[in-house]
Image: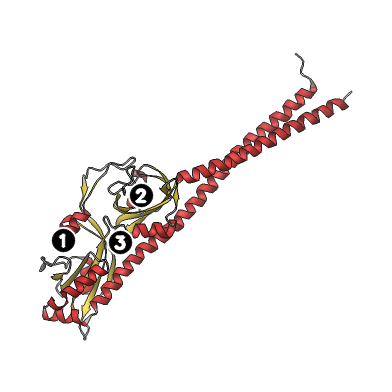
Amino acid sequence: MKISTKTKLALIFLTLACFMGVMTSLIVNSLITNQIIHEAQERVKEDLNAARYVYSSKIKEIDGITRWTSIRHVLKRGLKERNITPIQAELSTLMAEEGLDFLTLLDRRGMVVYRFHNPKLSGDSLIDDPFIKGALAKKAISGTQILSGEQLLKEGEALAKKAAIPSVPTPKEKERKIAEETSGMILKAAYPILDTNGEVLGALTGGVLLNRNYEIVDRIKSIVFQDAKYRGKEIGTATIFLGDLRISTNVMDKEGNRAIGTRVMKEVQEQVLEKGKPWIQRAFVVDEWYITAYEPIMDVQNKIVGMLYVGMMESKYAIMKERLILLFFLFSMSAMLVALMVSFLLSWKIQKKSP
């Protein structure tokens, strides 16, 4: 069967239009995907800065409380006279009002004079603690510290119990054989107590345990993500890790509980904890993909002890991308139909003019 010139021209125009439509769709799909992901990654990078500020602000808050308590004359007199009775109730109340989990008074040798959170135990030495060692050398120190289960037990059975977190099997984690984490991550400050001549009388240290403490992560979520939700789930989440273990988080599991005890994805663990580099890209978080930002948490001895994380649901951006691509596809199809009509019109005119 002989194909007419009109039909040949129409097919040529149609083929060119389809080819251009497909190529343009592929290019636009790539551009839209890259642009949306890039913007999301830039946002979580900024969100991580805000999260770091909230974390640091809590350390400064503890530092301020410890500092102003350490310069009180009644505390200095009690340390000189080895008589803490007049200030026990007052400082215990202050500790509770300021939200501190522990407040400890030490003499110039680093021996515990009184634990306001655990009065039953005193007389032990904390001279090897870098915070206490620094304070007794007239240096104010504040920051992050990891205490073992045994060390926490000295600070009180309630603290040790709160710190203990069973390990929950998590998809894509780096395999661990630890059934339960008993160590605790604390934010802590220590200040020297000086007499009128500037001589060291002792030291005061106070702080909070981060295990199962949700103040920081919920403040980050409220400030950064403004508690926004998408299809009933929180759009943004924040987490504090001890090593690769979630000890404070607002990431929820399938039962709607905070995903305490779950672990980070293996690739993130290797990048952040082993190499000490930030991770700013997608990651699998407990049970779904997020656009994430992680960075190391360092203790006062500049050792990597954990991670700070913020992330946004990837599904929201995936649906946004799909909608944009669909709109462009509909626009492309409309353009191709117009091109087809024009091709037929042109071919008809060309054939009409030809002898």
Q: Are marks 1 and 3 in contact (CB under 8 Å)?
A: no
Query: Which amino acid type is shown beneath numbered disc 1?
Result: Gly
Q: Are marks 2 and 1 in contact (CB under 8 Å)?
A: no
Residue 106 in the image: above or below residue 219: below
Residue 270 in the image: above or below residue 211: above
Label 1 SS: loop
In front of the other: 256 or 207 = 256
Judge depth for marks 1 and 3 and give the one in front: 1
In front of the other: 35 or 314 = 314
Answer left or right for 146 relative to 330: left
Q: Which residue is mark 3?
A: 302
The disc at residue 251 is 2
Quick one: label 1, few (<14), some, or many (20+) residues within 10 Å? some
The disc at residue 156 is 1
Q: Are marks 3 and 2 in contact (CB under 8 Å)?
A: no
Residue 329 in the image: above or below residue 217: above
Q: Mark 1 or mark 3: which comes first in sequence?
A: 1
Q: Position of residue 169 (x, y in %)?
A: 28, 41
- Label 3 to label 2, Cα distance in Å? 28 Å
In front of the other: 59 or 228 = 228
Q: Is residue 325 visible?
A: yes
Q: Position of residue 113 (x, y in %)?
A: 13, 72
Q: Mark 3 or mark 2: which comes first in sequence?
A: 2
Q: Mark 2 or mark 1: which comes first in sequence?
A: 1
